[in-house]
Amino acid sequence: MDWLVWLILPVAGFVLGWTIRWLYARYQLKSAERRVEQVTEDAEKNAEARKKEILLEAKEKIISERNQLEKETRDRRAELQRYERRVTQKEETYDRKLAHVERTEQVLVEKERGFKKREEVLAQEEERYREELERISGLTVDEAKALIIADLENEAKHDAQSLINKIEAEANLAGEKKARDILIAAIQRLATDITGELTVSTVSLPNDEMKGRIIGREGRNIRALETLTGVDIIIDDTPEAVVLSCFDPVRREIAKISLERLVVDGRIHPARIEEIVARVSKDISQKIFEEGERVLFEIGIHNISNDAIRALGRLYFRTSYGQNVLVHSKEVALIAGLIASEIGANRNIAMRAALLHDIGKGVDTDSDLNHAEVGMDMARRMGEDPRIINAIGSHHNDIEPTCIESVIVQIADAISAARPGARKEIVDNYAKRLKNLEELAEGFGGVERAYAIQAGRELRILVHNDKVNDEQAKSLGREVAKKIEADLSYPGRIKITIIRETRIVEYAR
């Protein structure tokens, strides 16, 4: 029995275990089914909620897109309306312009008809005048044309020949262009004063009784003054004035100052005259030396002997055609220095020679030599450079120039003496030439005003705009040029400029 029990107990335990396992498995299965159902239910709920959210978002997006579409549609409709209005306005403007063009075209057609009628009338008048001219002149139209063409050909040939001559002259002067540029630059850079009138040696007296005191008893005072100064004292009917005459300007200046001091002092007798003349001669000698030193200092030239300084100072009292010789020498030195600097010559030699070129005029000598020869001798005694000696002697072509500095001195001397305002005679001729040039131009019809500028090298002519057209202005320029060539004498050439302008003036108030 025991073995049956031991057999049944394991079988029963095994069956019980499987039963319990089966029950547990079934319980687990039901629990899993319940969880699945719960998960499924939750998923369905979440899906339903998510579905509602998606539907809601879709509806909102559809509504937003519909609103945006409606807005774009409204904007596009408004823009189309604006375009439509602009097109309508343009069509209206085009219609108005078209109507205006049609009216203008109609007016032009009517004017064209009027012009054709006038042309017909003018053609008839022209034919009548042509027949009358042919009758009066005895020439046919072809013969008259031939004469006019021949005249124009001759005038054209003359103008062409003149142009050829000018071109040839300009070609010949091409080599001198650089020299002219240098001269112009030197003249423009030099600023000098215009020379005044010659100083008249006249002494003013307080009254006519002083003339008797100057003459003195039996003429002893005037004889003493004339003997000591070497001048002629002219006492005539000129009221309250005495005239001094002497070839030597230094002596004349000494006599003038001495007589002025005697008149102021009142003590006029031979002893006093001798004392005053001696004192004034000393003062004048000192002034001569000071003037010579002053001009040397201003130009920057050194190492010149005292005799040369005094000779330069004496030029202070000399004039040539109204031009002070010392001022002229200084001016020539400045011009020569400028020219020498431009062309690369020796500037110091050119300036020194130019300053000393008229030194012979300041030398007191009884020689028959001219001032250039006297200046050469003095420069040779002073030991000056041979180029300076040659420049002094050749500045009036008494000898041939042997160096470029001598030629520069000649040019500078000519510029200083010939410039407008340097000498009284040249000033008068210069002003007269400009006046004649302007008067000649103003004598032509249609000319309003004429101005001679650039020292007479250019003539500017203002013409009346309503009387002279462009073609007539060209013809006027040629006629003025021919008139100047035929009637006037002038150096170089004259540029003629015709000015014709339309001027409109309005005021904003």
Image (cartoon, rainbow, N blue to C red):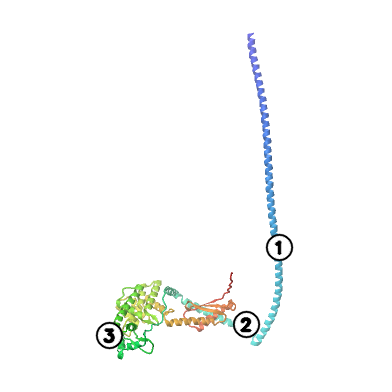
The type of residue carrying mark 3 is: Ala
- C-beta proximity under 8 Å, tags 3 and 2: no
Residue on which disc 1 sits? 92
Mark before the other along the chain sequence, 1 or 3: 1
Residue on which disc 2 sits? 145
The type of residue carrying mark 2 is: Lys
Q: Residue furthest top?
A: 1
- Label 1 vs label 3, nearer the camera: 3
Secondary structure of residue under mark 2: helix
Identify which residue is drawn at 63% across, 14% down.
10
Indicate the quadrant where residue 128 lies.
bottom right
Q: Is residue 86 above or below residue 441?
A: above
Distance between mark 1 and mark 3 Cα atoms: 118 Å
Q: Position of residue 35 (x, y in %)?
A: 66, 28
141 vs 448, nearest the viewer: 448
Mark before the other along the chain sequence, 3 or 2: 2
Asked whether residue 382 appears in the rendered view, the answer is no
Residue on which disc 3 sits? 271
210 vs 74, nearest the viewer: 210
Q: Position of residue 192 (x, y in %)?
A: 41, 76
